[in-house]
Image: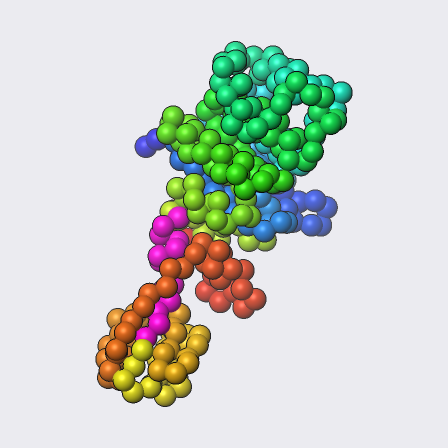
Amino acid sequence: MTQPVIETNDLSVYYGRNRGIHNLNMTVLPGEVYGFLGPNGAGKTTTLRVLLDIIRPSAGRAAVFGLDCQKAGVQIRRRVGYIPGELKLYPQLRADEYFDMVAAVSGHAVDGAYRRALCDRLDLDPSRPMRTYSRGNKQKVGLVAAFMRRPDLLILDEPTSGLDPLIQQHVLELVREARADGRTVCFSSHVLSEVQAVCDRVGIVRKGEIVATERVEAIIRGRFDRLRLRFERMPPPGAFERAGVAEIDRAGDWIALEIRQNLNQVLADAVAYGVLELDKDVVSLEEVFMAYYSKDGEGRDEPVAA
């Protein structure tokens, strides 16, 4: 079996009495883009900081490249490109001086042509002092620094924050190119459309715990279907009520149903009322995500196997 690039076992971090993450189990495989998905405060950044030995866990274990994160932090960081959610730069330096410093600290040679190409793609002038940069340009500096060494692992925490839509698309292209090169990406974001666009698998984090880990297409298909049916004879209210089925709208001779189970039975029952048309709506990752964070949370707190 291929060794995971990232693996955590019952990882927990507590801030006094407050829980950052609790018994978090996460596996990221070589060559994949893993989406780490959750709202602000769910525990995403805490987890990534443990992986880079920026903070120490209260319990459990984290490993990157098979190495213990707290014992081999320096060795791990030399193979990782990282952009933090809160990027701090040296305002007195020019961006190109900062890139030279990052390369020197990492101990890896950097392809100058590739570095320049990254700056061009992200529309960054690296000859200016970083104190003159806007928030978006500072984010571009962090992205170039993360990608320029072509690291084995990229850990990207909200990488498109502060960028305009065109540059955001260039960042997603860079992520796809990294995957095409066989490199691994851990992509932490709350921008659901981006996760859906580039990630192979997604881990959904809720209150410091991973509540589901699945392939993106499976988590969209497998969680629920949304059907709209037009009938010859309108079924009475409650005609399709059963476990895992909810009527979400009815208008004229149309009924909309959200179906988590018993799809075959719903279709069989619908035939009795004369189905004239049937449409299946595309369910976005955002809608699935919101289902995990619904107020009642019924049936959504159990981890799902990858």
Please tell me which residue is depicted at 70% across the width and 44% down the height of the picture. 15
Relative to 294, say whether 2 is above or below. Answer: above
Number of numbered discs visible in the structure rendering: 0
Relative depth, front residue between 262 and 95: 95
Please tell me which residue is depicted at 39% across the width and 53% down the height of the picture. 219
In reply to whether residue 271 is colored magenta, the answer given is no
Relative depth, front residue between 243 and 86: 86
Start-end of magenta stretch: 216-229
Q: Which quarter of the image is occupied by the N terminus?
A: top left
Please tell me which residue is depicted at 64% across the width and 46% down the height of the picture. 20
Residue 33: % across, % down: 43, 37
Relative to 222, say whether 154 is above or below. Answer: above
Q: Examine the image and state in which quarter residue 231 appears.
A: bottom left
Q: Is residue 15 visible?
A: yes
Q: Is residue 211 left or right of residue 134?
A: left
Q: Is residue 283 left or right of residue 293?
A: left
Residue 21: % across, % down: 60, 46
Q: Is residue 196 left or right of residue 280?
A: right
Relative to 195, say whether 185 is above or below. Answer: above
Residue 232: % across, % down: 27, 84
Please tell me which residue is depicted at 37% across the width and 67% down the height of the picture. 226
Relative depth, front residue between 184 and 89: 89
Q: Is residue 6 visible?
A: no
Q: Examine the image and state in which quarter residue 46 appears.
A: top right
Residue 279: % across, % down: 32, 68
